[in-house]
Image: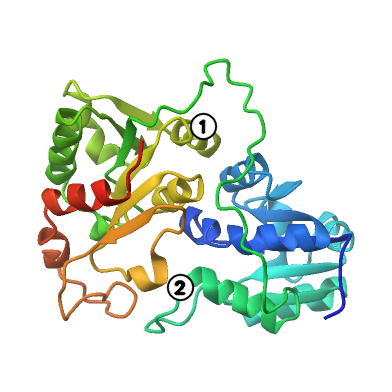
């Protein structure tokens, strides 16, 4: 395949944290192959992508000039931006958006579905890369990308060497249907602490319902709304335990020993990827169902049948300090 090195390319991604993190290995390959990539995505994600040295520049997808792509009159700033790149990689389900951008800017636009169709049991990371191979963007065979990125200096004077005894516990996710019970995570916290480790809870700004119970205890709780600060926090520790969530994907990408509790979602498609990662899920015929069945059960039997002891046993298997 002809080399396309030293060409600027623009990535456009409309997804949330987990959807974007699973593309990082492929994006790093693109960067290594072509020399530079910029990205249009959610503003908070763009700051993280820049911090992780994946993209040089990021542009907020929330901006008014981006939303004009869905109207009859596209902003001139958008036109100027698109024409500064050799080609564009669009992560979108929308063929209409693909046609609009292609007709508007005249550049080559490669559209990639953000994930395989529901029910197709292939990891999203592999789906993304194989789609890029089909478009001729990447070679079929490749050198593995180092999973732990080289981060830009945060400028945080409190930065210190990672403490391998520190294990972060994140009891939230993008959907309450995927959340293991808080009392289970609390039991995991107690077991880790009794074994001489340093468990610490991590909550995002959206996880208001969990804050009251945890903050009333004597446990260490971090409330983090900025993703760069979250990355800084995660890289200060050695382990992570959480649900199927974007934060779990970020933790594993940063190289932490990671255990993710799966319930209705499919670990074959969505398991975090990293140097030491395991998933825990009950063996039920009805699971996974999250993407294929709109009538997910309210009782979350699949999650309820996962015990704290099983999660701890799985964590011990991969954790090294």
Crowding at mark 1 (Cα within 10 Å: few <14, some 14-19, many 20+): some
The image position of residue 190, as x and y in percent, is 14, 33
Question: On the picture, is 195 further left or further right than 144?
Answer: left
Provide the secondary structure element on which disc 1 rests: helix
Q: Quadrant of residue 132?
A: bottom right
Q: Is residue 237 above or below residue 316?
A: above
Which of pointers 2 and 1 lies earlier in the amino acid sequence?
A: 2
Residue of label 1: 232
In the rendered image, which quarter contains the N terminus? Answer: bottom right
Residue 67: in sight, yes or no?
Answer: no
> Circles 2 and 1: CB distance less than 8 Å?
no
Using the image, tell me which numbered label, if any, was put on residue 118.
Answer: none
Please give the residue where the numbered disc 2 appears in the rendered image: 123
Residue situated in front as seen by the camera: 8 or 197: 197
Q: Give the percent coordinates (x, y) of residue 278.
A: 32, 58
Circle 2 SS class: loop
Residue 302 is situated, as x and y percent measured from the top left of the image, at 15, 66
Residue occupying the point 52% across, 61% down: 22
Query: In which quadrant is the C terminus drawn?
Result: top left
**Inter-mark Cα distance, 2 to 1:** 27 Å
Give me the residue at 39% from left, 81% from top.
Answer: 121
Count of number-bearing discs = 2
Q: Residue at x 63, y 64 (%)?
A: 26
Q: Residues within 10 Å of mark 2 (few under 14, many from 20)?
A: some
Answer with the quarter of the image where residue 192 lies: top left
């Amino acid at each position: 395949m002809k080399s396309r090195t030293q060409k600027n390319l623009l990535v456009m991604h409309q997804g949330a944290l987990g959807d974007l993190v699973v593309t990082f290995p492929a994006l790093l390959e693109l960067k290594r192959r072509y020399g530079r990539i910029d990205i249009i995505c959610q503003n908070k994600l763009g700051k993280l992508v820049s911090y992780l040295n994946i993209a040089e520049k990021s542009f907020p997808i929330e901006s008014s000039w981006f939303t004009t792509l869905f109207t009859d009159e596209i902003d001139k700033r958008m036109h100027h931006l698109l024409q500064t790149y050799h080609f564009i990689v669009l992560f979108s389900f929308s063929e209409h958006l693909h046609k609009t951008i292609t007709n508007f800017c005249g550049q080559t636009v490669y559209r990639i579905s953000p994930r395989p169709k529901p029910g197709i049991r292939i990891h999203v990371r592999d789906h993304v890369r194989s789609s890029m191979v089909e478009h001729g963007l990447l070679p079929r065979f490749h050198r593995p990308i180092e999973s732990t990125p080289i981060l830009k200096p945060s400028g945080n004077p409190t930065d210190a060497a990672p403490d391998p005894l520190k294990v972060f516990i994140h009891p939230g996710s993008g959907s309450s249907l995927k959340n293991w019970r808080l009392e289970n995570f609390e039991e995991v916290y107690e077991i880790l602490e009794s074994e001489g480790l340093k468990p610490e809870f991590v909550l995002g700004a959206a996880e208001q319902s969990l804050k009251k119970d945890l903050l009333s205890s004597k446990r260490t709780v971090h409330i983090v709304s900025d993703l760069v600060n979250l990355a800084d926090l995660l890289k200060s520790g050695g382990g992570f335990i959480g649900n199927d969530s974007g934060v779990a994907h970020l933790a594993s990408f940063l190289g932490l020993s990671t255990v993710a509790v799966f319930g209705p979602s499919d670990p074959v498609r969505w398991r975090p990827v990293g140097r030491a990662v395991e998933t825990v899920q009950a063996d039920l015929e009805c699971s996974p169902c999250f993407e294929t069945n709109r009538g997910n059960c309210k009782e979350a039997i699949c999650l309820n049948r996962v015990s704290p002891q099983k999660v701890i046993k799985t964590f011990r298997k991969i954790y090294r300090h």
